[in-house]
Image: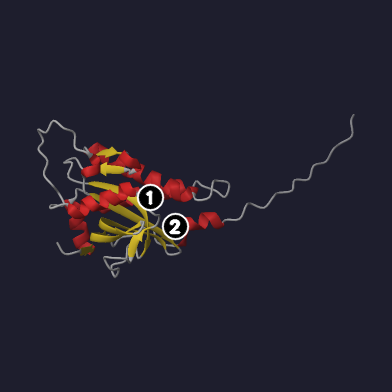
Amino acid sequence: MEPVCHVGEAAVRRLRELDLTPKDVHRAIAGGLAEARLCTEMDAPGMAGYAFWSRSNRTFRERMTPNAWTYSNSQSILRTIHPSGAFAITAVSGSGMVGEEAADFSGDVRTKNPKGSAVAKLVERNFGQLSLFPVFDEDEEDEIEANDLPTWFLLYKSSKAGLMFELSLPVQMHGKHVDTWLERIIIDDNPFLGAEFDIKRLDEIPPAAPVDVPVEFKGAI
């Protein structure tokens, strides 16, 4: 299969084939953003990014599980699993040209943080799948192993322009970063554009200036 980038109406159709809508993706990003905004300069360094990662996955799960999706935290990869057991999705921070149609399929978009052996095996399995959506026997007695499923990345990136995102299928990594994709789905409608959506700015907010309150002590009566 040749790499393909879905944009505009094609992106919406591709999401529909995955039983998703743009609003499902937006809700996950909004959930991560809301949690990150609770962080202040008194949190641990990097807390805003960790909070965004955790809450975006949680929010996506909360939205999808009423529709029979399930989830797994196996190997610390926060997967949300399609009801058919055919594929999973995990939200991951990205870097480079995330959300930009002009990006190449290899090298221009990559995961922000280095990944270990669990993600390396995940990407290997994605690459080796003969079908992106294998059919599982509904009468199978054995539980479908989450680690064997093709897994899409909901990539998000914070910048001065706001939050960029895309849903993409990784198939290769070089070094410690996933950087090669078979499919990229880019939603035109992005409600998170603007400097106010840049979570990196949370680390740049100076502490509030101290307030001097004059206190008068009256003599004892």
Residue identified by numbered label 1: 30
Q: Left or right: 137 with respect to 210?
A: left
Disc number placed over residue 197 in the picture, else none: 2
For the point 16% across and 52% down, the residue is: 129
Q: Compare residues 76 and 45 and report the one nearer the observer.
A: 76
For the point 39% across and 44% down, the residue is: 55
Q: Quadrant of the C terminus?
A: top right
The image shows a total of numbered marks equal to 2
Question: Can you give x and y, in whole percent of width and height, for residue 24 in the image?
Answer: 28, 49
Q: Compare residues 107 and 155 and report the one nearer the observer.
A: 107
Color theme of the render:
secondary structure
Question: Can you give x and y, in whole percent of width and height, for residue 182 in the image?
Answer: 22, 60
Res 159 quadrant in image: bottom left
Quick one: SS at disc 2?
Answer: helix
Quick one: SS at disc 1?
Answer: helix
**Badge 1, how many Cα within 10 Å: few under 14, some, many 20+?**
many
Question: Can you give x and y, in whole percent of width and height, for residue 38 in the image?
Answer: 50, 46
Amino acid type shown at disc 1:
Ala
Q: Left or right: 128 with respect to 73?
A: left
Q: Quadrant of the N terminus?
A: bottom left
119 over 99 or under it: above or below:
above
Res 145 quadrant in image: top left
Query: Between disc 1 and disc 2, whose residue precedes?
Result: 1
Question: Can you give x and y, in whole percent of width and height, for residue 62 in the image?
Answer: 31, 39
Q: Compare residues 143 and 118 and report the one nearer the observer.
A: 118
Measure the alpha-carbon separation of dots 1 and 2: 10 Å
Residue at the outermost top position: 221
Mark 1 touches mark 2? (CB < 8 Å): no
**Badge 2, how many Cα within 10 Å: few under 14, some, many 20+?**
many
Amino acid type shown at disc 2:
Phe
Q: Is residue 157 visible?
A: yes
Q: Left or right: 173 with respect to 18?
A: right
